Amino acid sequence: MKCVVINGTEQKGCTYMLKEIFLDELKPEQLSEFYLPKDAPDYCTGCKLCFMKGESLCPHHKKVAPIWQAMLEADLIVFAYPVYVLRTPGHVKSLLDHLGVHWCAHRPDPKMFNKTAAIITQSIGAPNNDAQKDVKTSLNWLGVPRVKKIGFGMMEGVIWNEISEKRRNRFESKIRYFARQFQDIKPAAMSLNTKFIFEMCRMMQNNLLKNNPKNKELSVDLKHWLEQGWIERK
């Protein structure tokens, strides 16, 4: 199994320990890891070059490309991050913003349609759901059909070794059980949600193609959909 982990913090605290236990149980044959914000691109400037001319022209392409390539090559995509003020950390959101060009509405990569992803989050005690939703929504629109989530409330503190042994043992049992769900994973089938998103976007691209003047050059998005054989000229 090839696994890529996108760590939402460089700190070796609670999130790091949960992720390490997860990997210890999973034991992937190949592992790539990125640590944000060190490996994260700068904030999107809204220049629209990725949409209009190609993602290689993004001013932050050098940082985005290795992460995206690792995601394409992986069997399992893991996002592990702490909850910041009830939401996803800004540097994780910044990365997701740069991947918007690969959403189904623009230029999806068919390799994403059989991927599996895991989201691991922790907070001091606040709910994890809203912070997980940002990443899950982006993964679904990238075409990932199978996304599983797990969240932890530390409650006793933010320093791993200051949490009681009993509670840490409970966390370890929970994260190891979660990791076992991804052992020997097979390519995921497109879910109903993924199919709905894709078909909705295909209809949109078909309409754009139909209404595109014959003397006007096709957009980068339309060229991609035509090359993939998802739409065709009539």
Image: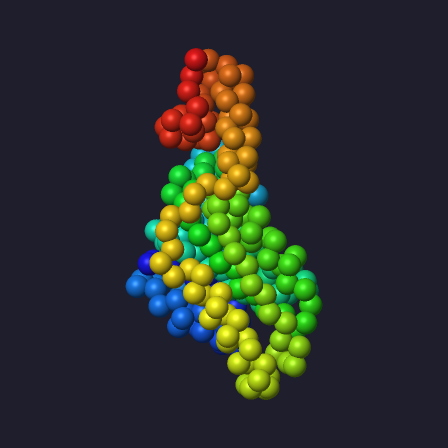
Up/down of 147 relative to 38, above or below:
above
Looking at the image, which residue is at 56% across and 53% down? 135
Which residue appears at 57% of the width and 43% of the height? 46
Whether residue 11 is visible to the viewer of this picture, yes or no, is no
How far from the left and from the top, in percent, is residue 198? 51, 34
Quarter of the figure that contains the N terminus: bottom left
Q: How many marks?
A: 0
Q: Nearer the viewer, residue 167 or 75?
A: 167
Determine whether 155 is above or below 83 in the image.
below
Q: Which quarter of the figure is the C terminus placed in? A: top left
Residue 16 image point, x, y percent: 49, 73
Q: Say which of 171 and 39 sits in front.
A: 171
Residue 6 is left or right of residue 133, and the answer is left
Query: Residue at the left extreme?
Result: 29
Position of 183 with respect to 13 (left or right) is left
Visible in this render: residue 158?
yes
Residue 210: image x %, image y %?
51, 16
Q: Quadrant of residue 82?
A: bottom right
- x 52%, y 56%: residue: 148
Q: Position of residue 184 (x, y in %)?
A: 35, 58
The colour scheme applied to this rendered structure is: rainbow
Q: Is residue 141 above or below residue 8?
A: above
